[in-house]
Image: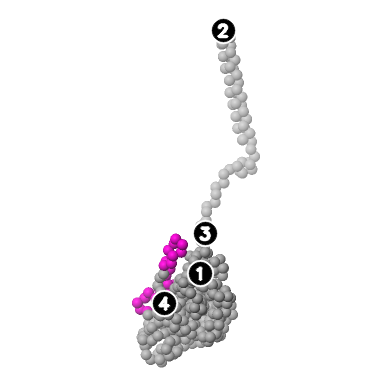
Amino acid sequence: MLPQAEAKAKASTSKSAAAKSQGAKKSTAKAGSAKSKVSPARSVRAKKVAAPARRSVVRLPEPSRQSFGQLYGLHDIADPLALKSGVAFVLDQDTNEVLLSKNAQAVLPIASITKLMTAMVVTESKLPMDEVLTIAQDDVDTEKGSSSRLRVGTQLTRGEMLHLALMSSENRAANALGRHYPGGLSAFVSAMNAKAKLLGMHDTRYVEPTGLSSQNQSSARDLASLVKSAYSVSVIRELSTSTERQVEVGNRQLQYHTTNRLVRSPDWDIGLQKTGYISEAGQCLVMQAQLAGRKLIMVLLDSAGKYSRIGDAERIRKWLINNPTTPALTTLEASAEPPKKFQP
């Protein structure tokens, strides 16, 4: 290309670039002008609004449901030991002498004390203790939604199921025991009620083998009869007072412990025991124990507070130790008695 032509081309290119630059500047200026003409309302909406400060929410605990005993005023009845249990009953196992009675005829939900009768029916059935039973979906608690480490499909022997039901109050194990009874669960419950009638437990009714239903009801006097009868069965004595048990479930080893810490206490000589709890029943405890040179049966129902049944048992133990022989000093009666039966 000739030098003059090349110079003209460069000049033309330079002018074109300058024109483009001027066009871009005008475009930018127009855009800025357009932005400045945005209406105030739109401008406010476009602004970033600061999020309100997060308030801390304090969740109050749900009020606890009252037990049947609380609803019917059993805890308003005074007793000389200031027990936290709405119902208390202590009986000399050999002489049938009543040493303590507080609302002993009141018929209330008994929670897992039910499992003592479950054990009675299982042991009297003479079914093989080494037979393997399987936890099924039907054993899952739909009444209270309680949890269990025995998953659906778990297989244990009848003896192991009975051990966990008595020592650790395992609900799925107790239900499986009833379900594997000849004739199924309904036949098992019928056998429970028939045994209660045979023992003279006229204020007692069972609808299932775990105690999760508040319709399983009894009185302290009836339960004393049950404890006395169950104490004659060596396997129930042994399993209910066991402190721990390890079971093999598939490739897992599960460790279970007693629900009654008094079994481990050197201050107690317990021959049979069972604990229980549902909200309708409160904290419950039945025991056969040797105290102050006597074989005694102790029933505590509808106790208010997680550890109150243990505290009441200790109060009774100390009272008996301090009054070992004189019947006049070792007989207590509540100041009043409530109506005998309560409806759910």
Can residue 279 be seen in this snapshot? no
- Magenta highlight range: 246-268
State the quadrant of the C terminus.
bottom right
Q: Nearer the viewer, mark 2 or mark 4?
A: 4
Q: Which residue is mark 2?
A: 2
C-beta proximity under 8 Å, tags 2 and 4: no
Mark 2–mark 4 Cα distance, whole angstroms, equals: 119 Å
Who's the residue at 47% across and 84% down the image?
229
Mark 3–mark 4 Cα distance, whole angstroms, equals: 50 Å
Residue 91: which numbered mark, if any? none
- Secondary structure beneath disc 1? strand
C-beta proximity under 8 Å, tags 1 and 4: no
Q: How many marks?
A: 4
- Residue 160 in percent (x, y) is at 46, 71
Q: Residues within 10 Å of mark 4 (few under 14, many from 20)?
A: some
Q: Which residue is mark 3?
A: 57
Who's the residue at 56% across and 11% down the image?
7
Question: Which amino acid is tagged 4?
Answer: Glu
> Which mark sits nearer the N-terminus, 1 or 4?
1
- Residue 334 in percent (x, y) is at 48, 86
Mark 1–mark 3 Cα distance, whole angstroms, equals: 48 Å
- Secondary structure beneath disc 4? helix
> Which mark sits nearer the N-terminus, 1 or 2?
2
Q: Which residue is mark 1?
A: 133
Q: Which residue is mark 4?
A: 238
Question: Which amino acid is tagged 3?
Answer: Val
> Which mark sits nearer the N-terminus, 2 or 4?
2
Who's the residue at 36% across and 86% down the image?
293
Q: Nearer the viewer, mark 3 or mark 4?
A: 4
- Residue 161 in percent (x, y) is at 48, 71
